[in-house]
């Protein structure tokens, strides 16, 4: 029984419902950790003693056994300090925000590529207004080659290359890396793409 403070009338401990909700939140966090790739997991501040339990939970695929192992992982997680679990949650939120920005940037690059294919020099001028560091001649050549490929029903090599050029161009702004050079930002995206594929 929780008991009350005689002077203030407040409960000494959390209610049973609150304890259950907290336990379910920890269980949900455990499920997220189990679903991550090893590379993504390595970037989180997960205590070393939890890693074997996470690995074991990933290994077990039978439904009931997996559920039991997940509950066992959550039990160990509840023994951790609240600050540790909050740090893991914050790191997960930061990773998902970066992922959302990357996806938005990729959609933007695809939109620009289509505009370039349809409108040619008009779209290129607008792109250069927004991204003055872009190489006009390179993009113009790629667009012309992509249009020729499309007309001749050839594999879309130049079309794909336009996307790569646009992605490299837009990456620093998408990741909030203004002032970084293209090679560094390309490395940053490749790292996050590799993790997404793991």
Image: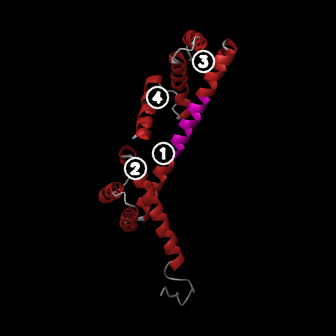
Dividing the picture into quadrants, the one containing residue 79 is bottom left
Disc 3: which residue? 132
Seen from the viewer's position, the closer of residues 6 and 30 is 30
Residue 95: mark = 1
- Report, in whole angstroms, how far the alpha carbon at label 2 lies from the one at label 3: 37 Å
Mark with earlier residue (1, 2): 2
Q: Residues within 10 Å of mark 1 (few under 14, many from 20)?
A: some
Task: Say how many tags the image has.
Answer: 4
Disc 4: which residue? 185
Given this view, does label 2 or label 3 mark the residue nearer the observer?
Answer: 2
Q: Are marks 1 and 2 in contact (CB under 8 Å)?
A: yes
Quadrant placement of the C terminus: top left
Image spot of residue 129 (x, y percent) = 66, 19
Residue 44: mark = 2
Q: Is residue 130 visible?
A: no
- Report, in whole angstroms, how far the alpha carbon at label 1 lies from the one at label 2: 9 Å
Mark with earlier residue (4, 3): 3
Residue 166: mark = none
Which residues fall within the magenta stretch?
95-108
Left or right, 8 with respect to 185, comes to: right
- Report, in whole angstroms, how far the alpha carbon at label 1 lies from the one at label 4: 16 Å
Query: Which residue is pictured at 59% across the width and 27% down the height?
Result: 109
Q: Is residue 70 magenta?
A: no
Q: Is residue 161 visible?
A: yes
Left or right, 30 with respect to 148, comes to: left
Mark with earlier residue (1, 3): 1
Q: Are marks 4 and 3 in contact (CB under 8 Å)?
A: no
Mark with earlier residue (1, 4): 1
Image spot of residue 164 (x, y percent) = 51, 23
Dividing the picture into quadrants, the one containing residue 194 is top left
């Amino acid at each position: 029984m929780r008991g009350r403070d005689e002077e203030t009338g407040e409960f000494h401990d959390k209610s049973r419902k609150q304890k259950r909700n907290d336990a379910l939140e920890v269980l949900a966090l455990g499920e997220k950790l189990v679903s991550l790739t090893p590379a993504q997991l390595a970037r989180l501040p997960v205590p070393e003693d939890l890693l074997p339990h996470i690995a074991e939970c990933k290994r077990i695929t039978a439904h009931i056994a997996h559920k039991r192992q997940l509950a066992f992982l959550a039990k160990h997680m509840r023994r951790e300090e609240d600050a540790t679990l909050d740090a893991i949650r914050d790191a997960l939120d930061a990773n998902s925000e970066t992922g959302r920005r990357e996806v938005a940037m990729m959609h933007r690059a695809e939109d620009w590529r289509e505009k370039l294919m349809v409108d040619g020099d008009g779209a290129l001028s607008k792109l250069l207004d927004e991204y003055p560091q872009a190489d006009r001649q390179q993009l113009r050549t790629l667009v012309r080659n992509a249009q020729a490929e499309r007309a001749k029903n050839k594999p879309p090599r130049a079309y794909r290359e336009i996307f790569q050029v646009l992605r490299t161009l837009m990456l620093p702004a998408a990741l909030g890396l203004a002032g970084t050079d293209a090679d560094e930002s390309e490395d940053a995206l490749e790292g996050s793409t590799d993790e997404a594929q793991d």
